[in-house]
Amino acid sequence: MYNAKAYSAVSGTSPLASTTIPRRDPNEYDVQIEILFCGICHSDLHSARNEWTGTVYPIVPGHEIVGRVTAVGSGVTKFKPGDVAAVGCMVDSDGTCPQCKEGLEQFCPNVILTYNSADKHLGGVTYGGYSDSVVVDERFVLRVPANLDLAATAPLLCAGITTYSPLRHWGITSGKKVGVVGIGGLGHMGVKLAHAFGAHVVAFTTSPHKKEDALSLGADEVVVSRNNDEMQKHAGSFDFILDTVSADHDINAYLNLLARDGNITLVGGPPMPLSVAAFSLIVGRHSLSGSNIGGIAETQEMLDFCGEHNITSDVEVIPIQKVNEAYERLLKSDVKYRFSIDMASLKSE
Ligand code: NAP
Ligand code: ZN
């Protein structure tokens, strides 16, 4: 065991602050990674503030990790010291259940998330990527295509896979009309990926100032969702809508934009239940579903796809000392479009 530097919150109302945390020495199949960049996901904020309940304190958030391998266990075959490596939202699963056997580790009943899950090695809970290092079983460590910028790649490990997976699951290709609701960290990746898959992409935003950006991210059209006339122009026309909104909003307004048999998939996790009008589903045989990140194999597929198509996140790189300010700005949708923490800044703590 050794001590790593990290930023943690000790309660739902305290700011994140510098601390040290225990990390295990690498076991036979472990990869030790010096963390170079970690994205800030809205889930980090929900969790740090216990908005979903169940947070164990202290919490070290962060599940969009890119770094350099510093040591490997004797049984590791995929990585060697010096390699660039990435870790997303999961660090372990049982590997034997039907979900794991299908490569859907995110649905394993024994999945271990990167933070705030029971740590079977050290006791307590797992600590995430707002830290200078992490030790992870090689099955959960991803390869990063050599052509991608590392700060801008970190967000792919959650925002990228969380939007890639449902777009693939629902068969999004050219000829499909796809809406993406909320142009934040997830949403801007959803627009880029749906565009790359050849769909006709409509971005829905509450922020009129994001209009130009959404077009350059790859949207074919942008709708300011507070404008009812703009919304109604698209009534009954979408094959698929990806909803990334992190707060309460009217889902019926979007259900009514679906074509017959159209689907809305929720990836955003507002803490309070959404209310659904029965007739928003009944008329048009619409469906409403959800999606949770993506499995490890699909995460690697997504990274390779992004490498081939030169897709990364639009990031604002910040030092760890600005993380609390970044959380406040995230709540105001004041980031284009993902904060990526330069973990070199942790060395001075
Ligand atoms: P984010 O960067 O804060 O983006 C959320 C966007 O939602 C905002 O940029 C904003 O877009 C829109 N929005 C915010 N408040 C709104 C409101 N009151 N009404 C309407 N629109 C609003 O967050 P993120 O990191 O993309 O995460 C989004 C959500 O997905 C969070 O709840 C997060 O926990 C969840 N998540 C889920 C998964 C999963 O596996 N399912 C994975 C990661 C994250 P506009 O300014 O364009 O309106
Ligand atoms: Zn996330």
Image (cartoon, rainbow, N blue to C red):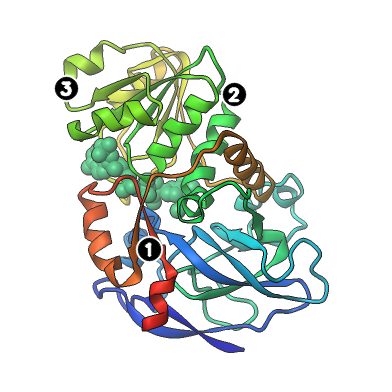
Q: Which mark is residue 171?
A: 2
Foreground label between 2 and 1: 2
Q: Residue 207 carries which label?
A: none
Residue 83 lies, in percent from the top left, at: 67, 64
Kindly check if marks 2 and 1 are in contact, taking CB atoms under 8 A apart as contact. no
Q: Can you identify the residue that label 3 sits on?
A: 227
Q: Can you identify the residue that label 1 sits on?
A: 47
Q: Is residue 213 left or right of residue 307?
A: left
N-terminal of the pair, mark 2 or mark 1, is: 1
| Mark 1 burial class by Cα count in 10 Å: few <14, some 14-19, many 20+ | many
Name the residue: 64% across, 77% down.
120
Distance from the alpha carbon under mark 3 to that under mark 2: 30 Å
Amino acid type, callout 3: Asn
Amino acid type, callout 2: Gly
Asked whether residue 57 appears in the rendered view, the answer is no
Q: In this view, does 219 lie above or below 141?
A: above
Residue 237 lies, in percent from the top left, at: 39, 11
| Mark 2 burial class by Cα count in 10 Å: few <14, some 14-19, many 20+ | few
Residue lying furthest front in this view? 147
